[in-house]
Image (cartoon, rainbow, N blue to C red):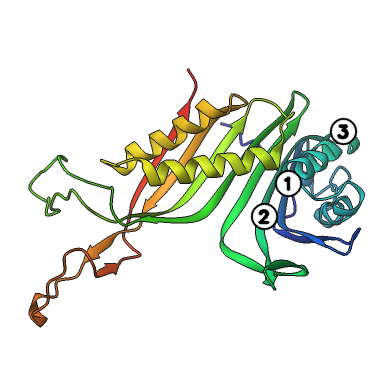
């Protein structure tokens, strides 16, 4: 039985790139973390230590910064496509590239009822994401978001579940439902209004989370994904991952107090993890 080199790639992970647009007195900001990974015939580097076909990861880092100026950094999907196509088309040994971009959101500081021209405050939790794959066959784009923390104080149940000898959980028809949502969606092509579509998908996810009377978090994810696909034919599938951020009613009876679902202990772990992909047939 022989030993051979399997699939491999290499790149520069988590390059922090901030682009400020100063074309007008009202500046714009894009703040991203970019990771590159290149594929190709790099067996000599692994088997013999021969770097002749290896584009240094430092060069990949430099390209991320240079392209933020040369090509611009506005819609992260376009930026990632530009990078991926450059590595595949312009660097001879490279046959495939994976570009992952996470974007942090900055909001303008309000001054006298108007957002300031060049001062922002960062929205800490939520991250916009994209992963672009480029090879000889073309390009695929998967966009999304992560760490979107949601909570609804009613409109959620959990009852009628399977019970065995180890079950202690009581049924409930009125509970807090909270999660830190991760959502990704795969596009059917690359001719997309990226910012507009991303914003509308986010809106749909939030609205369905709020308005679906949930009999289970699984049902809520299904309704969220289905609504996105119904509204956006340019999206092939939606994948959702939702940790159940449990909130337990605190027993206040030892203190002579009633607690009709008003005071809770927010537990961070362990947690239920519900995941689903909603796709087209």
Q: Residue at x 24, y 54 (%)?
A: 175
Residue nearer the viewer, 243 or 207:
207
Q: Report the Cα–Cα distance between label 1 and label 3.
A: 20 Å
Q: Residues within 10 Å of mark 1 (few under 14, many from 20)?
A: many
Q: Is residue 24 above or below residue 111?
A: above
Q: Is residue 2 above or below residue 75?
A: above
Residue 138 has which mark?
Answer: none
Q: Which residue is mark 1?
A: 76
Task: Give whichever of discs 1 and 3 has the lower sequence position.
Answer: 1
77 horizontally vs 281: left or right = right
Q: Secondary structure at mark 1?
A: helix
Residue at the limit of the structure toward the front, as seen here: 112
**Quarter holding residue 208:** top left
Task: Give whichever of discs 2 and 3 has the lower sequence position.
Answer: 3
**Quarter holding residue 29:** bottom right
Task: Give whichever of discs 2 and 1 has the lower sequence position.
Answer: 1
Q: Report the Cα–Cα distance between label 2 and label 3.
A: 26 Å
Q: Residues within 10 Å of mark 3 (few under 14, many from 20)?
A: some
281 horizontally vs 214: left or right = right
Image marks 1 and 3: residues in contact by CB distance under 8 Å: no
Q: Secondary structure at mark 2?
A: strand
Q: Which residue is mark 2?
A: 103
Q: Which residue is mark 3?
A: 89
Q: Report the Cα–Cα distance between label 2 and label 1.
A: 8 Å
Q: Residue at x 12, y 53 (%)?
A: 170
Image marks 2 and 1: residues in contact by CB distance under 8 Å: yes
Expressed as whole percent of the image width and height from the top left, the position of residue 72 reads 86, 49
Q: Nearer the viewer, mark 1 or mark 3?
A: 1
Residue at the limit of the structure toward the top, as seen here: 281
Expressed as whole percent of the image width and height from the top left, the position of residue 241 reads 44, 45
Q: Is residue 279 above or below residue 82?
A: above
Expressed as whole percent of the image width and height from the top left, the position of residue 89 reads 87, 33
């Amino acid at each position: 039985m022989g030993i051979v080199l399997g699939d491999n790639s290499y790149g520069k992970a988590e390059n922090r790139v901030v682009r400020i647009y100063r074309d007008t007195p009202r500046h714009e900001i894009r703040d991203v973390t970019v990771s590159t990974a290149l594929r190709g015939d790099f067996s000599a580097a692994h088997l013999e230590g021969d770097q002749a076909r290896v584009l240094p990861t430092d060069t990949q880092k430099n390209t991320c910064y240079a392209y933020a100026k040369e090509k611009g950094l506005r819609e992260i999907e376009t930026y990632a496509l530009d990078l991926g196509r450059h590595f595949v088309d312009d660097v001879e040994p490279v046959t495939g590239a994976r570009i992952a971009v996470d974007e942090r959101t900055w909001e303008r500081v309000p001054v006298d009822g108007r957002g300031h021209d060049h001062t922002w405050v960062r929205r800490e939790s939520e991250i916009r994401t994209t992963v672009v794959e480029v090879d000889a066959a073309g390009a695929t784009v998967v966009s999304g978001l992560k760490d979107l923390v949601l909570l609804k104080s009613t409109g959620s149940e959990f009852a009628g579940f399977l019970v065995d000898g180890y079950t202690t959980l009581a049924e409930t028809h009125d509970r807090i439902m909270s999660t830190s949502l991760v959502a990704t969606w795969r596009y059917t092509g690359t001719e997309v209004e990226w910012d507009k579509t991303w914003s509308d998908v986010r809106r749909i996810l939030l609205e369905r989370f709020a308005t679906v009377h949930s009999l289970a978090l699984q049902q809520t994810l299904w309704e969220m994904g289905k609504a996105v696909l119904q509204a956006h034919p340019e999206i092939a599938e939606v994948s959702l991952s939702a940790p159940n951020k449990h909130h337990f009613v605190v027993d206040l009876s030892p203190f002579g107090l009633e607690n009709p679902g008003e005071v809770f202990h927010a537990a961070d772990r362990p947690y239920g993890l519900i995941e689903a992909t909603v796709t087209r047939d």
